[in-house]
Image (cartoon, grey):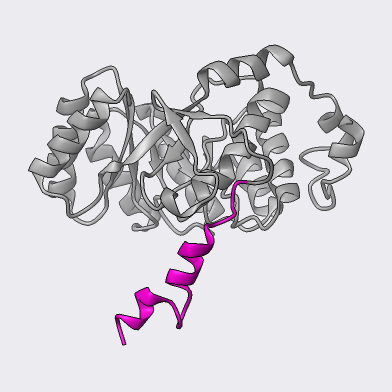
Amino acid sequence: MKQKLISCIDFRYITDALTEEEALAQTGKQQRVDQMLKEGYPAYTTSCAWLGYSDQLLKQLCTDALNDGWTKFKVKVGADLKDDIRRCSLIRQMIGPHNTLMIDANQRWDVGEAITWVTRLAEYKPLWIEEPTSPDDILGHAAISKALAPLGIGVATGEQCHNRVMFKQFLQASALQFVQIDSCRLGSVNENLAVLLMAHKFKVPVCPHAGGVGLCELVQHLILFDYISVSASLDNRMCEFVDHLHQHFRSPVVIQNAHYMPPKDPGYSCEMLESSVQTHQYPQGQVWKKLQ
C-alpha cells in the first residue's frame, strides 16, 4: 500500500531534497487515526479580524470565537502601521497572553519594509507573518526569515506556490517556517503529497491555506494524511478555517471545539449542491440575473 501511494508522486526535480527511499520510510499509526476521529485536527480562525472591521465588531467576533473554543486567531495587516498596532493591541487584549496570534500581510510589502513593519508589531507576540512580500520571491522570504528569527516570529507562505519545485527551494533556503499548501493551487493531490513529505524531512510544520470557497472542505483530507501518515506531530500545526459558504457543499466541513472533524462521507468533499450551482452559474443563475 505504501509503495502504491508513493508511486503517485513525481520525484523528478526534487530528489536533491527528497528521494523515494526517504518517502517510503514514513509510517502510519492506528492510534493517530483514533485520535483524529475523537478529537479532530486543530484549526485557527481568520474570520474575526479582517481589515475594515470596526472595533466593536472585532470585539464581538473575538468574544464569540473565544466562547466557541477558539484559541488561535489571525489578523490581517499591512494597510496602515498605526492602525495595525492599534488592532493587534486590541486583539491581543481580547484573546489574552496565552492564546495564539498570527498576522497576514497578503503580499503587501517589499523585503525591507516587511522587516521594519513586523518588528514594530513584535510586542504582540505573533507566531508568524504570512505572505510578507511577493509569493515568488524565495530569497526575499529567506532574508525576512533571518531578520525576524531573533524576535521569535516565523514566516508563513505557500498558498500561491503552484508546484513542488518552488516549495523545495523555499525549504532549502530556510525561507519559511510554516508551509501553507493550497489544495487547489498545487493542482493535484499528488503534488501536495510531495510537499508534505518534503516539509517533514526539513522539519517544517504544514499549516494549510483554507480561506477560499471550498478550500476547507478540500484540505481536511490532506492535513489528516499529514498527521497520520507523515509528520505524526501536531506541534505548531493548525489548519485555517473561515466560516462562510460551507452551506453550498454536499459534505460541508465539520468544526467541533475549534477542530476539523474527519469527514465521514466518501470522496474529496468538493461536490456542490446542484441548487447552489444553478443559482450561481454565470450568466444564467438567478444571482447574476439580478445584476443585469
Residue drawn at the location 38% of the way across and 26% of the way down: 152
For the question of whether residue 14 can be seen, the reply is yes
Residue 81 percent across, percent down from the top left: 18, 49
Nearer to me, 130 or 292: 292
Residue 229 percent across, percent down from the top left: 73, 26
Q: Along the horizontal axis of the image, is 222 left or right of 148?
A: right
* Looking at the image, residue 282 lies above or below residue 62: below
Residue 263 percent across, percent down from the top left: 59, 34
Residue 43's image quarter?
Answer: top left
For the question of whether residue 131 can be seen, the reply is no
Check the image and name the residue furthest to the top: 31
Residue drawn at the location 65% of the way across and 35% of the way down: 199
* Looking at the image, residue 146 lies above or below residue 94: below
Quadrant showing the N terminus: top right
Check the image and name the residue furthest to the front: 275
Q: Along the horizontal axis of the image, is 70 left or right of 219?
A: left
Q: Along the horizontal axis of the image, is 31 left or right of 209?
A: right
Nearer to me, 190 or 171: 190
Membership of 168 in magenta stretch = no
How many numbered marks does the figure carry?
0
Residue drawn at the location 59% of the way across and 20% of the way down: 37
* Looking at the image, residue 184 lies above or below residue 117: below
Membership of 274 in magenta stretch = yes
Q: Which residues are magenta?
A: 269-292
Q: Along the horizontal axis of the image, is 72 left or right of 120?
A: right
